[in-house]
Image: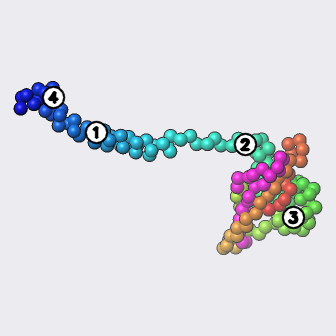
Amino acid sequence: MLLYEASYGVAPASRRLSGKYPAFLLQITCLILCVCMLLSPLAAKTPPAAALDSGYVRALAAADHLLQAWQSADVENGMVLLTSHAKEAATTEVVERFFSGPGPSAYEIGRGKLLKRGRYEFPVVLVSGAANGVHARRRFSSIVIVDTGHNDWAVDKLP
């Protein structure tokens, strides 16, 4: 037995581990790969948010001003925000009916999209309650805002 150990030149304990080494290495490699695959989505960069131009911000503000006028039933300030095209498309009666909703009201403005240069469309939800406050009604629509020149934005289509 001494001759056998001397021929290899390594300790008996080392010889016992050498037979298990490839399996151990395979297990460690698989473990490292699994951990890397699980962490790779966390390390991925999120795509940069699309830069908002100043036109989008002004168009959103115009939509918000119109809907604030609707919420407070302020026909005068609402009419000022309409383009001549919107005033022609909607009769005075329709505009007054739009601004004079019964009971409490609220609104939501969604993310707008550029239709073409100087023209944005925003999805809106108009929530109006009955005078007795029993039922609220939600109406889904959209509002179109246009650049009328000199960075003035106006509503071209009522919701």
Dot 2: element: loop
Q: Which numbered disc, 4 or 3, marks the residue closer to the eye?
A: 4
Dot 1: element: helix
Residue type, mark 2 in image: Leu
Q: Which numbered disc, 4 or 1, marks the residue closer to the eye?
A: 4
Q: Position of residue 142 (x, y in %)?
A: 77, 60
Q: Residue at x 20, y 36 (%)?
A: 17
Q: Position of residue 63 (x, y in %)?
A: 78, 53
The dot on residue 22 is: 1
Residue, disc 2: 52
Q: Whole-Å distance between the Cαs marked 1 and 2?
A: 56 Å
Residue type, mark 4 in image: Tyr
Residue type, mark 1 in image: Pro
Along the horizontal axis of the image, is 135 left or right of 76? left
Magenta portion: prevailing SS class: strand
Quadrant for residue 26, please give it: top left
Q: Position of residue 80 (x, y in %)?
A: 88, 54
Is there any visible trace of residue 66 in the rendered image? no
Q: Is label 4 in contact with label 2 (beta carbons under 8 Å)?
A: no
Q: Which numbered disc, 3 or 1, marks the residue closer to the eye?
A: 1
Q: Look at the picture and state if 142 lies above or below 23.
A: below
Residue stretch in magenta: 110-131
Would you call the spot at circle 2 few (<14 residues within 10 Å), some (14-19), or many (20 or more)?
A: few
Q: Whole-Å distance between the Cαs marked 2 and 3?
A: 31 Å
Residue, disc 4: 8
